[in-house]
Amino acid sequence: MTLPPKPASRPNKVSLWRYAKLFRQDILSAQPARLYRAWMAEFKTPFFRSFMINQPNLVKTVLKDRPDDFPKSGRIGEGLRPLLGNSVFLTNGETWKRQRRIIDPAFEGGRLRDTFPAMWDAAEAAVARLDTQAGKMIEIEAETSHAAADVIFRTLFSIPIEHHLARAVFDEFRVYQRSQPLLNLAAFLPLPRWIPRFFRKGTKASAAKIRALITELTRARMQSVARGDAPDDLATKIITTRDPVTGNGFDEAEMVDQVAIFFLAGHETSASALAWALYLMATHPEWQERLAGEAQALDTCDFAVMSKLRLSRDVFRETLRLYPPVPMMVREAACPERFRDREVRAGSQIVISPWHLHRQERLWDNPDGFDPTRWQTENGQKCQREAFIPFSAGTRVCTGAGFAMIEGPLILSRILRDFRVTADPAQMPVPVAHLTVRSAQGIWLRLERR
């Protein structure tokens, strides 16, 4: 069977200039093939050293055992700060800990049950939109982006995507998403803060428009909370939560930063994973039919139905393995370290790549193949514990991980219950990393009513 698409790797040795150019185009194809087998790789530039770690015990050290010794690299913020400000995605230390103490209660288990009806309504709305395009070849990433954005606005602000502010944020974000790579080239250069950063044309203007719209939504909600007539959704929960240590909550500026990352992380990652999941179903019709049969359980809006979507969860998990939405994470060594008998100086960049770890040839059986049954095997269960980090791991694990593992299988099942999806072999998608792992020319599928 044909393997799911994977970007071509670059030659093992290229000049720094050539690497920078490839990196600018796509960080996935800019890497050599040997990283799919290496436990660790060192990359040297005239300005800094970075180490990609691909060995489970090293990843565990950085993410779980000693996270304070390996804070999130400030280089990530070089590209994303115009949109995300001082959000929880970019901060470290006490600021980050305070933010998580306020945010985390909104995403606890009981709250997921409370948000389920909003997810259900978004899934129904997505199916209704797709019904108008049945029989046509459509770019499915645009549709999954629409659905994921709808989920965010319904669960966060109790408004559908059709609301004028929600729609304006979504439309502007589509512009931003294609203009902004995950890592800005400033990540290569340790420039002083006073030197201006350069972005692709329109990136900063687009970020400013998104933030202005989010500010309008946030301000209205905070006023509603103050009046006592706010709906009981995620935004209200976060606004009304006080830090148990300091007794303070978020002010308007801080809340805008957090809403920006909720939208980026919750919308971008879910849209990416759902689009790839539908493509994998289109190219594996036997699995598609199994999920369609399982999806017959979706007859009433009941949170308990999620326990019946076991196949859908396994397929979605396998999609996250093959196409982790955030392909690379960067930490910084706060103190000198020694990894695999190599000196890691303080200030070195530590790159953890879910993209490579999830396809590590020394760890996974059939690493490049699509096999949802792997999660019931001894190898799959061991790798799930040690080498599967689509939402990161440790204290910085994504707050919305549980949220995503309900939203993804639910919408996937709901679509497959009503539609059969097929792919055009002449339009095989090529994975590239923008803000998340997307296809260079989109993912084109045909949906037919069942």
Image (tube, helix red, strand yellow):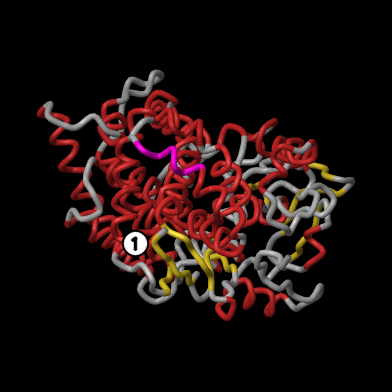
- Is 265 in front, or is 241? 265
Relative placement, left or right, of 438 versus 211 is right
Magenta-span inclusion, residue 296: yes
Q: Is 388 in the magenta?
A: no
The residue shown at (73%, 65%) is 1
User: Residue at the left extreme?
Assistant: 227
Position of 191 with respect to 245 (left or right) is right
In terms of secondary structure, what is the magenta stretch mainly? helix
Frontmost residue, 387 versus 182:
387
Q: Is residue 430 above or below residue 309?
A: below
The residue located at (74%, 55%) in the rendering is 359
- Crowding near pointer 1: few (<14 within 10 Å), some, many (20+)? many
Q: Is residue 71 above or below residue 16?
A: above
As rendered, which of 77 and 133 lies closer to the eye?
Answer: 133
Q: Residue at x 68, y 79 (%)?
A: 17
Which region is colored magenta?
Answer: 294-299
Task: Please provide percent x and percent y for residue 207.
Answer: 34, 62
Quadrant position of residue 213: bottom left
Give the x, y percent position of residue 400: 46, 38
Q: Position of residue 383 (x, y in %)?
A: 75, 40
Whether residue 349 is visible here, answered yes or no, is: no
Write down the residue under mark 1.
130
Looking at the rendered structure, the kind of residue marked 1 is: Leu
| x and y, in percent, of residue 434 in the image | 51, 65
Secondary structure beneath dot 1 equals: helix
Quarter in which the C terminus is drawn: bottom left
Residue name at image x 56 percent, y 58 percent: 281
In which image quadrant can residue 397 be found? Answer: top right
Q: Is residue 185 visible?
A: yes
